[in-house]
Every structure is written in structure tokens, then in C-alpha cells.
Image: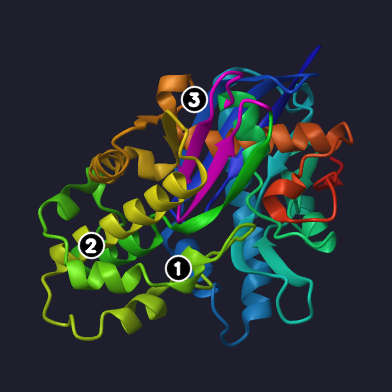
């Protein structure tokens, strides 16, 4: 017995929305049939980026940004329905992650918080489909990090019964899943992904990202700067752990660029790309030394220079795009939230205490009926 779900993902890269239509079997196996990608309108992207930090009238701006995001999500849903020839009533539910603007688990009062802007009630109203949202807060309430949530999904689509596999998602932040043949799953955020590279590229070239890593490839890695970046305490703390733009943001970068004001911008870009590669490779070597394959998804899998650096740092591990396993890199996280919606609708646990550090596995998400 299979059911149709839509998964929507807008990640910390803030490049836009990926939506997938997937059929999910009762045992959790799934097949993606359609994919739609929609870039953020410039004004919405600017607002979402600004809301990653405290500012004037942020509650008002957050509410309106949530409404705008729900409308953008609905446009992606409508495109998926149009291209598939399906009706809203054919879809069991939409899994809509929302846009993370703050992530501070276990801080302040011992519970902390994570905040994903979204208006799932409006999305249900606009699409006529049940919406599952707010996937992270239940895990936080149980003492967990609330992130990453994709390792359980990675196990289902990339896990192997006879060898350890590592799966690396490189969005704005990078997260690593270690999938062991005995079924044990580990996972955590291992450091920056595209966020710093994209910021620097936008600042100096006007382009939203370094296409194919070509600009980074034209520069030279600044070894002293790379060493300084790699000293960040977060990189050396043990899992479970998660992070976001709360840490790896332009202010963090500017503080570490002191003494490098005269460096060529392309050399800084080369160094930031090497920083992401080194942080991810170090965690792979530290926690998954037996992995014969590193499966890379997210926008970072499309960065040829980043993939080259990952392979150079992991000579005994084959670095491949998730495309080699039948799931294109930009579809993986959206597919994960379709899968998480399926788990919520069936009231099945989807969190992994071995990943988030929570007191136990929990059903994730809240349902907003159409």
C-alpha cells in the first residue's frame, strides 16, 4: 500500500524552495516522481536572511515573512500538481519544514529553542492538502538537539547491510550521517556548508553562489587563514551537536579575517571552500573511518571544487553524488520531509536519540488538516 506525499524544503542556504512528489510505501520505502525548484524572490530572501539576527520589529516581520513563505510553498505545490496531473485530494499530506532563522538547542534555560518560520495553516488553506510542520520542537522538548533530522531517512535510502556508509548533506550547514551495517545510525552537524562561501561570493561577485566552484578553483588556499578557521570550538566538540547561521555567519567570518584584509577575494573563497571540505572530511575520518563511500547531497554536491577537495582529503573513500544512488542532490532533503510527514501521519517515531541526544524516539511534526 502506497500513498502520495509532497515534501518541501528551504534550507539554510536560502537559495529557494525544493519540492518533490513522492510515493511512500507503508514500510517507508519511497520513490520520487516529480521535482520543482523555485528561487526565492529577492525581497523575501533578504528578509529571511535579516531575521537570522535580532532587529527592530522582528515579530511583525517574522509573521509577514511566514505568510509570504507559505504562499511560495503553495506555488511549488501547485506546480507539482500541474506537472503530475494530480489533484490535491490525491495527496495524503505535505511535509513543510519551514525556514530556520534561529537554532539554539539546550541553551538559555536548558531546553532552548529552534525557530522555523512557516504558516502551515495558510498553506493548508491555499492547497487543500493536510500539512505536517514543526518537525524539530518535539525532539527539543525531549532533551534533544532537534537536528539533524535526515539521518533516519539516509539510513532508509543509502544504508547498506554489509558495509558502513557515510552520507553528507552540504546545504548552508553540513551534516554527516554514519550508517553502520548493524543498523546503528549516527549523525550531527559537522560545520559550515555553503553559507560562508555563498556570502563571500555574493559580496565580491554579485552572484548568489560560486557556480561549480570555479571562482574558488581560481584562487589559492591561504594556509594561515584555513588554520585559524579550523580552530573553531564547535568543530572539535563531540556529537550530538547542531548549529546554524547563529554561529557560522558573516560576523563570525569577519572576526577571523583580521590580518587578511589585503587577501585576494578569490583566495579567501578558495580557503572557505577548503574549510568546508576539511571540516567534513575530518569528521568522516574521525567517526566513519571504515566508510568506503561518502554520498554527498545538497547544493554542495554540485560544487565541483568542493567535491574535488573532499576526495583529496579522503583518499581511501569514494566520494560520489547522491545522483549515483538514484536520488539527485537537490531532491534529498525535500524527499526526507515527505518521508517525515508519512511517519507523522502514521504516528510512527522518526527521531533518533543516537543522533539528537533526546531521551527517546518521538513522533515528529504537527498536523494542520486541510
The residues tagged by marks 1 and 3 sit, at their Cα atoms, a distance apart of: 30 Å
Residue reaching furthest top?
1
Q: Residue at x 44, y 32 (%)?
A: 295
Residue 368 location, x and y as percent?
A: 84, 46
The residues tagged by marks 2 and 1 sit, at their Cα atoms, a distance apart of: 26 Å
Q: Is residue 339 left or right of residue 192?
A: right
As for residue 178 lying within the magenta part, the answer is yes
Q: Residue at x 33, y 51 (%)?
A: 277
Residue reaching furthest right?
347
Q: How many marks?
A: 3
Image quadrant holding the C terminus, namely top right
Residue 83 location, x and y as percent?
A: 54, 22
Label 3 sits on a secondary structure element that is loop
Question: On the image, numbered disc 2 is attached to which residue?
Answer: 271
Image quadrant holding the N terminus, namely top right
* 6 w.r.t. 252: above or below: above
Mark before the other along the chain sequence, 2 or 3: 2
Residue 156 location, x and y as percent?
A: 65, 26
| Quarter location, residue 89 | top right
Question: On the image, numbered disc 3 is attached to which residue?
Answer: 327
State the residue in front, 100 or 238. 238
Q: Answer yes or no: is residue 257 visible.
A: yes
Q: Answer yes or no: is residue 203 visible.
A: no
Amino acid at each position: 500500500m502506497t500513498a502520495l506525499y509532497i515534501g518541501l524544503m528551504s534550507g539554510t542556504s536560502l537559495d529557494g524552495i525544493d519540492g518533490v512528489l513522492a510515493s511512500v510505501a507503508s514500510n517507508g520505502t519511497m520513490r520520487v516522481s516529480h521535482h520543482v525548484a523555485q528561487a526565492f524572490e529577492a525581497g523575501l530572501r533578504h528578509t529571511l536572511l535579516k531575521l537570522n539576527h535580532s532587529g527592530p520589529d522582528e515579530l511583525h516581520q517574522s509573521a509577514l515573512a511566514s505568510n509570504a513563505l507559505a504562499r511560495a510553498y503553495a506555488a511549488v505545490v501547485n506546480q507539482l500538481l500541474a506537472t503530475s496531473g494530480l489533484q490535491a485530494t490525491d495527496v495524503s499530506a505535505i511535509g513543510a519544514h519551514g525556514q530556520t532563522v534561529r537554532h539554539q538547542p539546550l541553551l538559555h534555560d536548558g531546553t532552548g529553542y529552534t525557530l522555523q518560520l512557516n504558516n502551515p495553516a495558510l498553506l493548508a488553506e491555499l492547497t487543500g492538502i493536510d500539512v505536517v510542520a514543526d518537525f524539530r520542537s518535539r525532539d527539543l522538548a525531549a532533551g534533544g538537539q532537534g537536528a539533524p533530522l535526515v539521518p533516519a531517512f539516509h539510513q532508509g535510502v543509502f544504508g547498506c547491510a554489509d558495509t558502513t556508509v557515510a552520507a553528507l548533506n552540504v546545504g548552508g550547514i553540513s551534516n554527516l550521517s554514519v550508517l553502520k551495517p548493524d543498523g546503528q545510525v549516527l549523525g550531527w552537524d559537522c560545520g559550515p556548508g555553503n553559507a560562508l562561501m555563498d556570502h563571500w561570493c555574493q559580496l565580491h561577485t554579485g552572484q548568489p553562489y560560486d557556480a561549480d566552484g570555479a571562482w574558488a578553483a581560481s584562487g589559492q588556499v591561504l594556509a594561515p587563514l584555513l588554520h585559524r578557521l579550523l580552530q573553531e570550538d564547535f568543530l572539535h566538540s563531540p556529537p550530538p551537536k547542531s548549529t546554524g547561521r547563529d554561529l557560522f555567519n558573516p560576523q563570525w567570518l569577519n572576526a577571523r579575517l583580521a590580518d587578511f584584509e589585503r587577501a585576494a577575494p578569490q583566495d579567501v573563497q578558495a580557503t572557505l571552500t577548503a574549510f568546508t571540505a576539511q571540516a567534513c572530511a575530518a569528521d568522516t575520518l574521525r567517526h566513519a573511518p571504515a566508510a568506503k563511500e561518502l554520498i554527498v547531497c545538497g547544493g554542495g554536491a554540485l560544487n565541483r571544487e568542493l567535491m574535488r577537495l573532499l576526495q583529496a582529503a579522503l583518499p581511501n573513500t569514494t566520494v560520489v553524488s547522491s545522483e549515483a544512488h538514484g536520488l539527485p542532490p537537490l531532491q534529498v532533503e525535500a524527499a526526507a520531509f515527505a518521508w517525515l510527514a508519512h511517519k507523522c501521519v502514521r504516528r510512527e517515531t522518526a527521531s533518533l536519540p543516537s543522533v539528537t541526544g533526546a531521551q527517546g524516539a518521538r513522533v515528529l511534526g504537527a498536523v494542520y488538516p486541510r
